[in-house]
Image (tube, grey):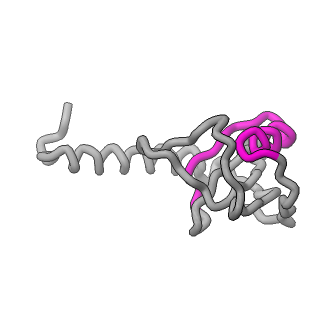
Amino acid sequence: MIPKRMKTVDDLRSALRAGLKRQKAALDGPHDPKTILFRVSLKGKKALGNCTHQVYGKTISPASLLISFRPTSADYRLEYVDEKGGTLTDTWHASINSAFEQAEFEYGPITDWVKIEAHSDA
């Protein structure tokens, strides 16, 4: 049921986006801190077209990739990051090698990963 205060489709879209942001914040909240392990800029790199990532129905073009570790859930994430450093979306991986393999599946061989020393958002 749509609340009475929502009178337009734009009101409904705004409410849905706000709900999705709250869900993402709950999933990425302080209960599951992350440690960033590696970063690579995608400047000059083209996606191979093996898969696409969409946010709100639009295909994203990240500026860089991060590989992070979540100690609480003991998993790795390949994060797709915008120009401002915000995570657009991510993929879950059981191992760091799997995260690297996913990046190469999407962008081909990547040789310029930068190791990040002890950067955590905990």
Drawn side of residue 76 relative to residue 81, left or right = right
Give coordinates of residue 27: x percent, y percent. Answer: 57, 44
Drawn side of residue 18 relative to residue 2, left or right = right
Q: Residue furthest bottom?
A: 84
Residue 105 sits above or below residue 60 on the image: above
Q: Residue at x 12, y 42 (%)?
A: 4
Give coordinates of residue 76: x percent, y percent. Answer: 76, 43
The answer to if 90 sits in the magenta stretch is yes
In the image, which residues are magenta? 86-108
Please state, as top left, top right, bottom left or bottom right, where the N terminus lies in the image. top left
Q: Is residue 122 something that shows in the picture?
A: no
Residue 7 sits above or below residue 87 on the image: above
Q: Residue at x 82, y 57 (%)?
A: 37
Drawn side of residue 42 relative to residue 99, left or right = left
Give coordinates of residue 102: x percent, y percent. Answer: 75, 39
Give coordinates of residue 44: x percent, y percent. Answer: 70, 62
Q: Residue at x 19, y 36 (%)?
A: 2
Closer to the camera, 23 or 110?
Answer: 110
Closer to the camera, 101 or 11?
Answer: 101
